[in-house]
Image (tube, helix red, strand yellow):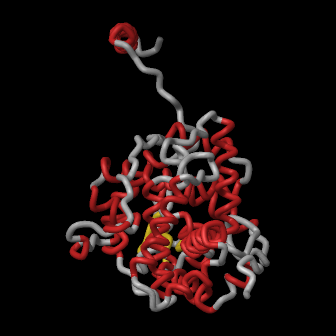
Amino acid sequence: MENPFYCVNQVFEDKHVVTFLNDSYNLSSSHKTRDLYKQILHSFDDFCKIQYDKNMLVLIHSLEGKPISEALEVFLEYKRYLDNHLNRYGNPTTNSTKRVRLSVLKGFFRSCGIKIHHEDIREYVKIGRKMRVQKFALDQEIISKIIEKIDKFEFKTLTVLLASTGMRVMEAITLQPSDFDFGSNPVAITISAKQTKTNESRTVYLTSECNAMIEQLIRTKPQNQRFLFGKPSNPASIYVLYGYSMRKALRKLNLHKILDNGFNQITIHSFRSFFRTYAGHLISRDFAESFIGHRFYLSEYENMPVEEKKKLFLKLEPDITFSNIQVRPTQTNQDIVLLQKQVEGLEAKIRILGQKFLLDPKS
């Protein structure tokens, strides 16, 4: 009898697993998605060894030709396993995470020949509502402090880029010097369709602050370094290092806090959210959604001229620039009255000096 605990590498070298993971990358062009799918399969394989004393491939093979209810029972048992499983932060697995994992497993089962449908899982496996928590709102001052506390210049630049363009982090990490048009005003980045989540190309612009930092990175980048924001040749490795640097900076500022949903109150995605919020309120929702690569109602009719788009971005630039930010103290009514009196006094002195000059221009 085959040992159910044979090397994990053998399980993940199986053609069904390799094909499934490769398809997940081809659909999304995202290393992060592929790694997530692989992590979920690892979790399910661990569950199978604990619950059924066999690896996931042997279990799935044993379900071939059996009633669909037996496969659904496996899904139910895995959901119960997740109910009692703590995540890496020591918190229970959230309902949204359970839904994602069961959805990925459904796709893997189907790739292995077990035709299971979403409606069957939803009816058989009951999961509570998704937990929604209040998001932490970033502003220029907080982002400026985070940038200051980040150690490496390339990660400071990456943070400025994310917060001032709303780019997805993997879109930014995979940029090449050839993607920048320094002859444009403002400097433009062409994000190719194959690098985006939606397989749609788009153009974004850089603030003067971000442009200066990017130019410095390009000048100092070693020739054998593939990407701008780190030495690793794998974008996923740069993402991991950036995440570590970000959490380190947040801890220095006492902003590292895990919420009830298991996520940090400030994540890398928070910078994209910041840009979307400010661009949406200060310019327009359509401009913001189009700029960050979202589809929206009647977005197929959105086709703004390039020069008009540049003008709107330049109008937004002061609110998405993070260097030399001066915090203005809150002024009370009493402060305003005092300042007004001082201004009136200065104006009176100017009038007196002006009259004196007119009467005696030689003085």
When asked about the image quadrant of residue 294, the answer is bottom left
- Coordinates of residue 9 in the picture (x, y in percent): 74, 81
Residue positioned 70% across, 67% down in the render? 237
When asked about the image quadrant of residue 276, the answer is bottom left
* Residue 277 vs residue 210, the one in the foreground: 277
Residue positioned 20% across, 70% down in the render? 298
Evaluate whether residue 190 shows in this view.
Answer: no
- Coordinates of residue 332 in the picture (x, y in percent): 37, 13
* Residue 40 vs residue 127, the one in the foreground: 127
Number of labels in the image equals: 0
Whether residue 337 sits left or right of residue 93 in the image: it is: left
Which quadrant does the N terminus fall into?
Answer: bottom right
Residue positioned 56% across, 68% down in the render? 170
Whether residue 283 sits left or right of residue 244 in the image: it is: left
Residue positioned 55% across, 54% down in the render? 268
* Residue 2 vs residue 26, the one in the foreground: 2
- Coordinates of residue 315 in the picture (x, y in percent): 36, 52
Q: Is residue 295 above or below residue 146?
A: below
Evaluate whether residue 230 shows in this view.
Answer: yes
- Coordinates of residue 66 in the picture (x, y in percent): 45, 87
Whether residue 205 sits left or right of residue 298 in the image: it is: right
Q: Is residue 172 above or below residue 263?
A: below
* Residue 4 vs residue 174, the one in the foreground: 4
Q: Is residue 212 above or below residue 224?
A: above
